[in-house]
Structures are given as C-alpha cells and as structure tokens.
Image: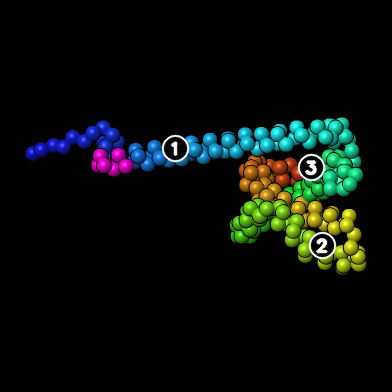
Amino acid sequence: MTTTTLPASAAHYGGASPAFLRRRAFWNRVSTHILLLAAVTSVLVTVGIVYVLISESIPFFREVKLWDFLTDTQWTPVFEDAHFGVMTLVSATVTVAGIALAVAIPAGLILAIYLSEFASPRVRETIKPFLELLEGVPTVVYGFFALLLVTPLLLLAVFRAVYTEVNARIQTAALGLAQGAPVAALSPDEGVLADGPNQTAGMKAWDLWREEIRQSDGW
C-alpha cells in the first residue's frame, strides 16, 4: 500500500493541492500590492492637497495682509473694492454649528431615550435602520431640501414674507435634525444602554427610594 505524504503547507490547508496553494499565494501577493497602492495613493493625494494650498496661499498673502485677512469683517472678493476678511466665514460657520447642535443634541437624546427605555423591541428594530440610513445622507442634501421645500412653506405660513436671516436659521435647524439621527441611532447601543439592565434597574430603584424619603419627610 502506497502512502502519499503531503507537504507541510498542503497539510495545513486540509490537503489542498499545490496548484491551489500557488494560486492562493499569487492572489495574496496581488491583493497586497493593490492595498499598498491604495495606501500610497491616499498619502500622495493628501500631500498634493497640502502642496496646492501652500502654493496658492503664498501669492494670495503677498497681495493681502495677514492681519487684514484675520480681522476684516467683509468678504467681497469679486467687488471693485475687494475685501478678504475671513471673520465673516468663521462667524457664519460658528452660527451654523451652534444652531445645529442646539437642535441635534436635544432631539437626538430624546429619541435615543425613547428607543432605549420606552419603545418596544419591535419598534426599536424598525426605527433604527431608518436612522442608520439617514446617517449616510450628506448634510448638503438636507440643506437643499430645507431651502427648496421647508423654508418656503414655513416662511409663507408663519412669517407671511421672506426673510433671509430666518431662511438661514431654518436651513441650519434642518441640518441639526440631520445630525440628530446619528445621535439617536448610536445612543441606544453605545450610550444609554451601555450600563446594562442591572445598572439601569438600580438607578431606577435609587430614584424611587429618594422619592419615598421625600414623601415620608414631608418635602
């Protein structure tokens, strides 16, 4: 009776043939080079972006003083009397971020608490996939939707006119609602329920005990 002895590498893969092992090694090398190329490309793209920013900034700051750029309150690059004050852009960014956070944090936390403490498992498992889908929608889509649909309806129904300042605030609030979806989707699993059912029950018992003491002492 003839006994066939397999190579150690073939025995490691359950008796695979040498041809299979050669193909496996070849595709491993190909995938390694592809991943290396992707990593190098991302680094080169980042370096290119930094180079373009620096190369374009040097001629700009030869024409515009750095102090004027940082302190000027006007941004009118296409006007005859051009101004390049970045403070206008910074203040608008801070305003948008502040209003969006003021809307996103309460809305997201309220929905997260509802999903984790009050909603039934069926309702939770139904709503969460939709919230996770909303996470993938770019915020510019929400702003565009608010600009074309939400803003005109609210302005005509509430203010009976068009106000640019209110228009911007409505779009920012829509952006806040968009950011509230990720908070609501992640909080039930990673935040509100992170302590587990035993800790949650203990906190509820502690609150009930404190309430009983208040009532017994006549607070």
Q: Which residue is mark 2?
A: 151
> Residue 107, how many percent across, how many down?
76, 52
Front label number (2 vs 3): 2
Sequence-first disc among 1 and 2: 1
In the image, is residue 166 part of the stretch drawn in magenta? no
| Residue kind at label 3, given as amino acid type | Arg
Please give the range of residues in magenta.
Answer: 15-23
Residue 210 numbered tag: 3
Q: Residue at x 28, y 34 (%)?
A: 9
Q: Nearer the viewer, mark 3 or mark 1?
A: 1
Report which residue position mark 1 lands on. 33
Identify the image quadrant of the N terminus: top left
Q: Are marks 2 and 3 in contact (CB under 8 Å)?
A: no
Residue occupying image coordinates x 80% and y 53%: 172
Residue 130 placement (x, y as % from top left):
63, 58
Q: Residues within 10 Å of mark 3 (few under 14, many from 20)?
A: few
